[in-house]
Image: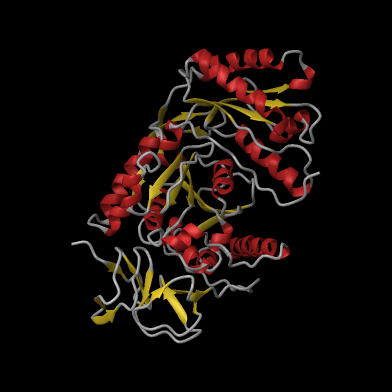
Amino acid sequence: MTARFIKINPDDNVAVAIENLKAGETLVVDGNEVTLVSDVPAGHKFALKDLAKGENVVKYGYPIGHAREAQPKGQWMNENNIKTNLDGLLEYSYNPQLVDVTAPDKGLTFKGYERKNGDVGIRNEIWIIPTVGCVNGIVGQLAEALRRETDGKGVDAIVAFPHNYGCSQLGDDHENTKKILRDMVLHPNAGAVLVVGLGCENNQPDVFKEFCGPVDESRVRFLVTQKVGDEFEEGMKILRELYQIASQDKRTDVPLSKLRVGLKCGGSDGFSGITANPLLGVFSDFLVSQGGTTVLTEVPEMFGAETILMNRCENRERFDETVKLINDFKQYFLSHGEPVGENPSPGNKAGGISTLEDKALGCTQKCGKSIVRAVLGYGDRISKHGLNLLSAPGNDLVAATALASAGCQMVLFTTGRGTPFGTFVPTMKVSTNSNLAKNKPGWIDFNAGVLVEDEPMESVHKRFCDYVIKVASGEPTNNEKKGYHEIAIFKTGVTL
């Protein structure tokens, strides 16, 4: 029989409703009777004891805030009666708690595309990337024309990636744009790339080409539209040449250790930290144990759980980098006059998340228990196997783009509310509850909601791992089936 509630950690003073509960119901939690004094929606919390004003509310074994006023046993605990404990910058100390997740090599493989430089892609696509937003219309026309001409066959996709930037930017914004576009040019999921520039933009095509570094010039080409007569005809000529090369590529068996996966959540609810995020955590540890790589981002959604990650850093140098990662993002909030704890969205709150700590303690479960091996700045590319932390905001499309730019061949995206989007790599949606999977089968790729029904983690993880390998070997995700491929670049400064 499916449980009606769950107490996640023995030290918790709240439990989470698995289904809608009614005022007046009496539940037995750890042998103690709790009579609900209010209705409690599924995914939401109720108090297991009387809580004094200012007393910490504990979930996942950690405080997620404190009671704004005294609350009776059995009360529905939500954002109206819980207040965050977060407040500004903190001093941290390194207290290593390292868990070795290594395990015997199971010899698993996926069918990927081995590139000339040794990287492996899980897609073989032709990408048309503008250096500046002024040529967005041109790249869109080129992509559509090549799709019509080839009938979409021979490669996995032909995609243009319009964006708003590349000119009228200064400082970090200009560097961010260059880094993300460079990372796309170098990404192994692209079998061929045409970079289209205007000619007078800040992101000068010749300078950008040098910024990209060494490339396979048979597969990466540049077109400056102000320097040619008919940019469409010239672009199609180049694309036909690129298509002939990329369409010859074949999948081969490569070890699972070559897989790099981004970990992301969005539209989280009260089940995120109970089902989908722990599932990704188990998978992340498994992939790392097989020599693979996972990347966790959404730095503002680490606030309140950051010490857990800090104490999993492999050494003091990595710890110091993680402290900087956290405090730099907090300073970014404070410099704009914004509080560091103002994060949960209306959808998060409706789904049962009350504070940023509540969200963070669920969010960080996506990376399991692995040791933090590297900390990446925004736009940096993966250089070490194992668990990486990446600087990026919580915004779904910005963060997913950053994960893909770091070199992840796919993004695993947990959600309790649902979302259709996809970034420029396969973006697999994992639902936290079965109702979402049932109601949005065109969005959701895998349902983790069964974890609070009758399926144990071991079997769910086995099915999930098998599915990830299928996607890595070519099975399209829902966003790919619908042709949803988008990018978003982080912007912090002025526009000229």
Judging depth in this view, the residue of 262 and 454 nearest the camera is 454
Q: Nearer the viewer, residue 27 or 447?
A: 27
Residue 187 image position (x, y, % from top left): 57, 34
Q: Give left or right: position of 91 versus 114.
A: right
Q: Residue 195, relative to residue 463: is it above or below?
A: above
Q: What residue lies at 78% left-to-right and 48% top-to-bottom?
A: 171
Q: Position of residue 402 (x, y in %)?
A: 59, 45
Q: Nearest the camera: 237 or 432?
A: 432
Quadrant housing the N terminus: bottom left
Q: Residue at x 58, y 72 (%)?
A: 86
User: Residue at (64%, 51%) from the top-left corner?
Assistant: 377
Residue 364 in view here? no
> As drawn, which residue projects farthest toward the left?
1
List x then y, in percent, for residue 409: 49, 38
Q: Is residue 402 visible?
A: yes
What colour scheme was applied to this rendering of the protein? Answer: secondary structure
Quadrant in which the C terminus is drawn = top right
| 50 vs 191: above or below | below
Q: Is residue 287 left or right of residue 356?
A: left
Q: Nearer the viewer, residue 352 or 240?
A: 352
